[in-house]
Amino acid sequence: MTASPTPTASWTVPQRWTVAATVLGSSMAFIDGSIVNVALNAIQQSFAAGVAGSQWVVNAYTLMLAALILTGGALGDVYGRRLVFGVGVGIFALASVACGLAPSLLVLTGARVIQGIGGALLIPGSLAMIGAVFDDAGRGRAVGLWSAATSATNLLGPVLGGVLVQQLSWRWAFFINVPLALGVLWCLRGVPETRSSGANRPDLIGSVLATLGLGLLTYALIQAGESRGTGLLASPGVLGGAGALLLAGFVAWERFSPAPMLPLALFRRRAFSGTNLLTLLLYAALGALTFFLPLNLIGVQGYTPAEAGAALVPLALLLTLLSRVAGSFAGRLGARLPLTAGPLICAVAFALFARPGLGGSYWTTYFPAIVVLGLGLSVTVAPLVSAVLGSVADRWQGTASGVNNAVSRTGGLLAVAALGLIMLGSFRGELETRLQARTLPPALVGTMMAQADRLAQVQPPSTLSAAQVRALRQDVQQAFIGGFRQVSWWCAALSVLAGVVGFFSFSGSGKQQEEQA
């Protein structure tokens, strides 16, 4: 007869403090991610920003997470997980205050960079501290509580963000992190320090190469959508080439480094490389969709921020309720079926997002797409995590999880930039066509097209009549919907590719999969 998991009542005081600190810390990071997307429309209005500025509000944070999250985990292993976690929480909180007080978009973007550094120190430490403080019997229950709390955060985050933006200001989307951070730091007083005696030193050169390479490549993609001319050294082609060279240098360094943060040998396993390619494709689609959807709901469809946040609740609710069932199913039958079917269901959802036009009830327009996306992700996420961990030996599981986390962030980072370029090109083309069809004076067309990088916030001249302003506003909204449809179809294509990768990366049964790993 096997022993039952240690009940919560028998946890030691340090274990209880550890769970409290990690739940609060993770919730702070997850809430921030969901709130900022809902706040983007208000941020764009506040600073009269174009789409490039909005992209950097998201990408500055994601870039640092993608490039430094493995380094953050390594720092915790070497210098102490509680110490690095606490430093990350402190940096995250101070940067959140700077975000909320930012007088300009440039300052906000810089503060988001620092916030991303804090997140890279904070996020890897959550489960690492739980794993170090609990034994095998109690670890599962502690991780389950952590997972339940983060699922609740995913449910409440968008709604909380919408209410804060609507009732107070977008700045409170960042200020809300301060009381959470103070709670985390209070809990850390009772958390024991842990570290790994055999841990490798952080790969600082690899971190710098990854950050610069991803940063230049992302900047090049965003800059390519700008209508302004640039010099040769600042041209998107040169910047993108430099970014690609730095990323190639990163791969070469990891190949020969005595202590790489990205062990390339792991990618020789078909299951490991396949799960990470699937992650890159699927989370690229998800990142782009969740960036543009709130802009559509608030800026075009007329939803309030609270309504836009609530619109995403069915997705998080389905993930919370169905992920465990999907994980059990994959454990019995293997990863191939869910990692093929799940992304294909997501592809159907992305295609459904391309269906609505201007107006209409939420229940007949975006609700069906959100529900189908929730079903697709529920089928995919838990089996994907299990497949990543099952594709490597036990001693590499922490590294494998960190790599997959970094890959998911990288997918979203690059997709927001690349599909933003497609969105902007489609919007400009359709808006110009619609304006020219009205036989408007060339000067008026030029005035509106000069604002095209603001997407749905392009404003007709105030000298026009109310009827003319309404008609031109509708042209702007229809042009945005045309661009959003293009993004949705590209997301569907990426998700189909993810399903194809899932099919070819695994054998047909759980037993065969284990033998392969």
Image: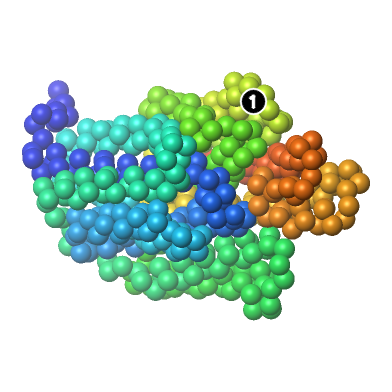
Residue 125: give x, y in percent of width and height. 27, 52
Residue 495 lies in quadrant: top right
Above or below, comparing residue 31 to residue 93 in the picture: above
Residue 282: give x, y in percent of width and height. 55, 43
Camera-side residue of 396 and 348: 348
- Quadrant holding the N terminus: top left
Task: Say if residue 434 shows up in the picture.
Answer: yes
For this view, does 207 lie left or right of residue 76? right
Task: Say if residue 309 shows up in the picture.
Answer: no
Q: Measuring 25% from the left and 33% from the top, which residue is drawn there?
A: 145
Residue 136: give x, y in percent of width and height. 18, 39
Above or below, comparing residue 278 to residue 203 in the picture: above
> Which amino acid type is marked by label 1?
Thr
Other residues around mark 1 within 10 Å, as few (<14) / some (14–19) / many (≥20): some
Label 1 sits on a secondary structure element that is loop
Q: Residue furthest right?
A: 439
Camera-side residue of 44 and 483: 44
- Quadrant holding the C terminus: top left
Q: Measuring 14% from the left and 39% from the top, which residue is drawn there?
A: 16
Colour scheme shown: rainbow
Q: Which residue is mark 1?
A: 365
For this view, does 448 lie left or right of residue 327? right
Above or below, comparing residue 351 to residue 230 in the picture: above
Q: Measuring 42% from the left and 49% from the top, which residue is drawn there?
A: 171
Residue 288: give x, y in percent of width and height. 58, 46
Residue 328 lies in quadrant: top left
Camera-side residue of 496 and 242: 242
